Image (spheres, helix red, strand yellow):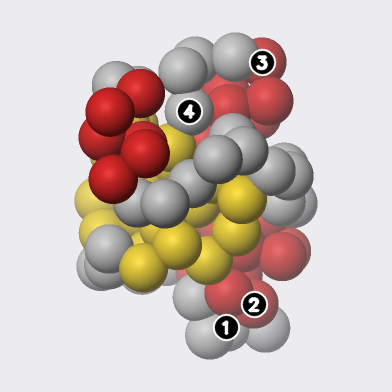
């Protein structure tokens, strides 16, 4: 599983990254967490508001910081 955090590195983006790492660790699953910071790459996803979270190339959330629990649900757990 590939989880991408789309954002320029703002505090909200960093919080979303930390929450994604927490969710993966608590679930005990294998996942690669990648930060996508280039604006052109973010725009290629059709995202206009950051931070955003994509799972396996599909945007699941944009414009808000999800909690670790919310991320678990998006991943199909919990």
User: For the residue labelled by badge 3, is the local secondary structure a helix, a strand or a loop?
Assistant: helix
What residue would you read off at disc 2? 73
Task: Tell whether label 2 touches label 4 (CB within 8 Å).
Answer: no
Task: Tell whether label 4 touches label 1 (CB within 8 Å).
Answer: no
Of pointers 2 and 3, the one earlier in the residue sequence: 3
Q: Position of residue 22 (x, y in %)?
A: 57, 47
Task: Tell whether label 4 touches label 3 (CB within 8 Å).
Answer: no
Which callout, 3 or 4, points to the residue nearer the camera? 4
Marks 1/2: CA–CA distance: 5 Å
What residue would you read off at disc 3? 11
Which callout, 4 or 2, points to the residue nearer the camera? 4
Marks 3/4: CA–CA distance: 10 Å
User: For the residue labelled by badge 1, is the local secondary structure a helix, a strand or a loop?
Assistant: loop
Q: Position of residue 18 (x, y in %)?
A: 57, 34
Marks 4/2: CA–CA distance: 21 Å
The residue under the point 26% across, 34% down is: 41
Of pointers 3 and 1, the one earlier in the residue sequence: 3
Query: On the picture, is 47 further left or further right than 11?
Result: left
The residue under the point 27% across, 67% down is: 56
The answer to whether residue 51 is seen in the rendering is no
Query: On the picture, is 16 further left or further right than 40?
Result: right
What residue would you read off at disc 4? 7
Q: Residues within 10 Å of mark 3 (few under 14, many from 20)?
A: few
Task: Tell whether label 2 touches label 1 (CB within 8 Å).
Answer: yes
Q: Residues within 10 Å of mark 4 (few under 14, many from 20)?
A: many
Q: Which of the two residues, 8 or 35, is positioned nearer the viewer here? A: 8
Name the quarter where the C terminus is drawn.
Answer: bottom right
The residue under the point 72% across, 65% down is: 70
């Amino acid at each position: 599983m590939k989880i991408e955090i789309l954002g320029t590195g703002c505090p909200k983006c960093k919080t979303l990254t930390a929450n994604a790492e927490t969710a993966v660790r608590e679930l005990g699953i294998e996942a690669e967490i990648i930060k996508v910071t280039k604006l052109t790459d973010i725009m290629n996803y059709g995202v206009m508001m950051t931070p955003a979270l994509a799972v396996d190339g599909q945007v699941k959330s944009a414009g808000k910081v999800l909690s670790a629990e919310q991320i678990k649900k998006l991943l199909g757990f919990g």
